[in-house]
Image: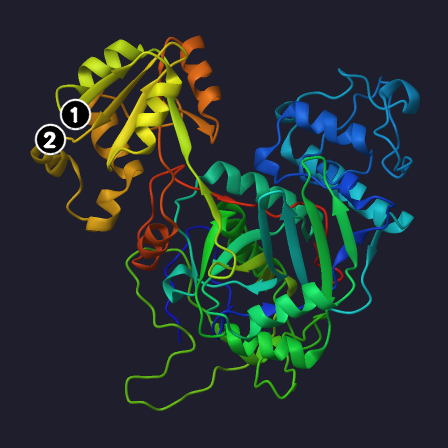
Amino acid sequence: MTIYGSMPGMGTPELPVPDGLVLRPFRGVRFAVEDPAKVTSPPYDLISDADVDALLHLHPNNVVRLILPRTPRPDSAHTTPATQPLPDTAAPSPATHALPAEDAFPAVDELPPETRYAEARDTLQAWLHAGILVPDERPALYVYEQHGPHFLQRGLIGDVALTDPGQHVILPHEDVMPGPIADRLALMSTTQANLEPIFLLYDGAGGPTTRLVEEVATRRRPLVSATTEDGVTHRLWAITDTSEIATINADLRDRQALIADGHHRYATYRVLQRQERLAHPPTESSPTPSDTAPRGEASGNAVPASAVLSSSAARPGDAGTNPTPAHSSPADGSHQPPSTTLVAPWDFGLALLVDSTAYPPDLKAIHRVIPGLPLAKAAAQASQSWRVQEFGTLAEGLAAFEHSPDPAFLLADEAGAYLITDPDPVQLAHAMPADHSDRWNSLNTSILSEFILPKVWGMRDDEQAVRIVHHDVEAAAKLATSTNGTAVILKPLATEDVLAVAAGGERVPRKSTSFGPKPRTGLVLRTFAIN
């Protein structure tokens, strides 16, 4: 039995324990519109208020209404009913189609969560009743392809069985914050749905799952083909054959998956699982639609999801436990099959699983901006422990930075840049925590958070003191200039370093990674009532 720790206030529901990495088929819910691209969106945490407006101008039934709902003001006469689809030709204008005026929506944060997510629940139900959203007839695993000008990624979307990190099956590499979990929990529990997949990576080693994904994507007709405004084509296929699904799960069982994107959503899945099991304990009469997660040999014999889940009445969450994976054998070499436990929809979460050996991810850096720390002052303080080189332009600094040995950072604003390299080894060693691995201590984000920020500049690495800019060097430099501050430009981490840190049970510092390409939201949804 897997031993779990406690989670204060959450009680002790009996939780099923997956027998390895399990990907269950589900009845996907998909938009029935002429151009599916216009009802999709980026992941919720990459969408600004301006992006919401742009997405709603593309189509009033855009999935952003569900993942980031905004309720029109009651006195606004410029609203379009949520169930009224618009033509899928050109992007409609507000004047032509009476979309909400620019000030018809309050800012998202002005509405209490219960109001926003009740709106999302009602919109979801209205779209299902109106036929704007339609569930597929059969449970499936979905092959998902993203093809852009310079990349190709393929993977599988399905219901991943939830595991405790101590099982070393699904590996987080970042810590999570309570605020985003509370926000997504309110959305998922109110809508009773998973509206966008998390992004998982695994080493498929060219196995049968990877070969099947390739065969499906190259030889079968897709259910969906949509090209979004960024030039990326998204295609979706359904695998419904029980023997193929069994082959996939037999191959996945003993593998590990890294959470590339969606740490807060995965943590929310697990909190929701405990919350719903406390409120609605599964019984013999409980409906378990799609209780057909295959596990077994490649012979094609599909078995219920409960056959790959053992039960645990202990509680996930405490640190300090190192449980044995559910699929391992006892020390005496005997094999004890897991006990059968009824499973419910919230024992799984929507996920995209990608073989990182077949499709290496695009791992980008996340830069920092320190408002109120002028560039010249930042460089002068860094010179006490680093070698500092000044450059007259940002472009010159970036060219030198690209070829500099690690660890290295570029301090910049729009007017110039300083390259810092070759830290004093004694000061660096003294600053890095002894209770972390050498690999963790060598990460540039670790050196920044443990040495440069607190020791060189005397500040904490938190959201108040340090601003975050994804990928865009010019945007970081511009923000530094406008705040009389300093942009800290970083190189992206190596995927193998992130995997090694996660496999060792450690977490990289906050905002260390940005894996891509991220799955598009809205191509396939999952509701608990249907699954």
Tag 2 secondary structure: loop
- x and y, in percent, of residue 266 in the image: 52, 52
**Residue at position x 82%, y 47% from top?**
125
Amino acid type, callout 2: Asp
Tag 1 secondary structure: loop
Residue under numbered circle 1: 386
- Label whose residue precedes the other's in the sequence (1 or 2): 1
Alpha carbons under labels 1 and 2: distance apart: 6 Å
Q: Quadrant of residue 3?
A: bottom left
- x and y, in percent, of residue 183 in the image: 57, 38
Residue under numbered circle 2: 424
Image: 75 above or below 293: above
Please name whichever residue, 180 or 364, is drawn nearer the observer in this view of the structure: 364
Marks 1/2 in contact by CB < 8 Å: the verdict is: yes
The answer to whether residue 264 is left or right of residue 147 is left
The answer to whether residue 69 is left or right of residue 328 is right
Q: Quadrant of residue 485?
A: top left
Please name whichever residue, 455 or 339, is drawn nearer the observer in this view of the structure: 455
